């Protein structure tokens, strides 16, 4: 057992938190009881995933102010008390939370709610939408956090005092940052925006396994494929996502997107045709070749009316005119609000709008607070392009 570690952080900040190491369920439950009535809890994780699909939890940090607890997930399983803490009660703060939510879901098998992601909060305040934690802390507190342990081995035991300090600062400063962010968001009337965005973030985390069938949409070259080839790529990427998860392998170790895209382009029928694809691994053909060929065959036999629609070429004049008009709307609104354009709409959302408009499908216009500001002008911009 690693003894409780007490560190004074006067060189870094005015707070002097007590750092406690947790490596048994009794200590974890006792810590949960201490913070159960808190209004806000800061959370962070350290993990390793170079050789696996699922992240390997190496450390879980949390603090409600004063004490920073460091949970050793290599020694203690999640308890019911910590699951309740994650899914109920206090507001949970995380920064750039997508991977942390995955770690917590894998270790605790529990959702995290209610949630605030301080990176999203910063984006809504008009700052860099991808601001890192260390720069965020410097922005709001003027303090420079140590960077020495950023790439350290979090699975080794015992952790060094430097690692423990680094991990504790990740949650202690998060509470101070949120105090400033909350005041700024409320002053601008944007707290409800943040709550809405974080609710969507939580919803996405809950349906991560169901997103396998949507992975193919990330491919920026779909427009070069026919509908039947797109269906092949969809089936292949859906299979790869499920198999990588089941085998607990990085998706690229199983088969990367480039190889699957080439399969969809060539629509192979035999193993020797698979072998002609650049970068394909012989071990993949030996182990999974029949499955891959069966998926391609399935797409080849799919009824035409059930195929995905063709994707418009971004090089076509009609496409370019629409993209230019939509970007002007988004940029104008972003300038008025003082935020980055990508905070309002991602490029893939603009592309979906254009694709729908070109074939006269219902427009997937933004909803919520974004829709209130953008839906009408986006629709009008597309109508003006059509009329021109």
Image (spheres, rainbow, N blue to C red):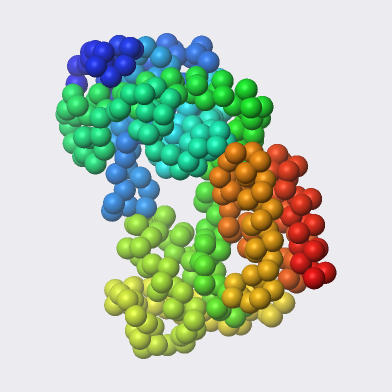
User: Which is more toward the observer, 361 or 90?
Assistant: 361
- Measuring 24% from the left and 41% from the top, which residue is drawn there? 151
Q: Quadrant of residue 338?
A: top right
Of the pair 344 and 363, the residue shown nearer to us: 344
Q: Is residue 15 shown above or below 141?
A: above
Vertical position of residue 352 compared to residue 41: above or below: below
Asked if residue 71 can be seen in this view, the reply is no
**Quadrant occupied by the N terminus:** top left
Q: Position of residue 142 (x, y in %)?
A: 36, 24
Give the image location of residue 230, x and y in percent. 57, 74
Which sits in the foreground, 293 or 201? 201
Q: Is residue 270 left or right of residue 195?
A: left
Res 302 quadrant in image: bottom right
> Residue 306 at x, y = what percent?
69, 74
- Rendered position, 119 above or below 213: above
Residue 181 appears left or right of 190: left
Q: Residue at x 59, y 80 (%)?
A: 226
Residue at 19 percent across and 26 percent down: it is 162
Q: Left or right of 357: which side holds 250? A: left
Q: Position of residue 86 (x, y in %)?
A: 49, 27
């Amino acid at each position: 057992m690693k003894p409780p570690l007490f560190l004074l952080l006067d060189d870094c900040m005015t707070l002097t938190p007590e750092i406690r190491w947790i490596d048994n369920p009794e200590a974890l439950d006792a810590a949960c009881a201490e913070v159960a009535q808190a209004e806000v809890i800061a959370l962070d994780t350290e993990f390793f995933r170079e050789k696996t699909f699922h992240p390997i939890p190496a450390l879980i940090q949390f603090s409600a102010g004063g004490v920073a607890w460091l949970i050793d997930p290599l020694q203690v399983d999640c308890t019911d008390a910590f699951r309740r803490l994650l899914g109920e009660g206090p507001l949970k703060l995380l920064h750039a939370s997508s991977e942390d939510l995955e770690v917590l879901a894998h270790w605790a098998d529990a959702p995290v709610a209610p949630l605030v992601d301080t990176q999203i909060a910063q984006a809504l305040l008009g700052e860099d939408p991808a601001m890192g934690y260390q720069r965020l802390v410097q922005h709001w507190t003027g303090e420079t956090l140590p960077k020495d342990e950023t790439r350290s081995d979090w699975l080794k035991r015992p952790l060094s005092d430097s690692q423990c300090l680094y991990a504790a600062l990740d949650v202690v400063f998060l509470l101070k940052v949120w105090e400033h962010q909350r005041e700024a968001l409320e002053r601008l009337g944007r707290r409800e925006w943040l709550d809405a965005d974080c609710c969507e973030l939580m919803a996405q985390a809950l349906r991560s396994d169901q997103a396998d069938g949507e992975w193919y949409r990330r491919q920026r070259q779909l427009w070069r494929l026919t509908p039947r080839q797109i269906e092949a790529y969809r089936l292949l990427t859906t299979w790869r996502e499920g198999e990588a998860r089941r085998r607990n392998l990085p998706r690229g170790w199983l088969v990367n997107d480039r190889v699957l895209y080439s399969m969809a382009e060539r629509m192979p029928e035999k193993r020797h045709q698979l072998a002609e694809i650049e970068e394909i691994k012989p071990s993949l053909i030996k182990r999974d070749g029949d499955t891959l060929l069966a998926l391609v065959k399935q797409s080849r036999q799919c009824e035409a009316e059930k195929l995905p629609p063709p994707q418009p070429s971004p090089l076509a004049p009609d496409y370019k005119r629409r993209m230019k008009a939509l970007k002007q709307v988004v940029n104008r609104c972003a300038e008025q609000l003082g935020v980055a354009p990508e905070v309002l709409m991602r490029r893939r959302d603009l592309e979906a709008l254009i694709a729908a408009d070109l074939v006269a499908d219902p427009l997937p216009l933004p909803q919520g607070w974004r829709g209130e500001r953008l839906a009408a002008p986006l629709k009008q911009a597309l109508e003006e392009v059509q009329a021109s």
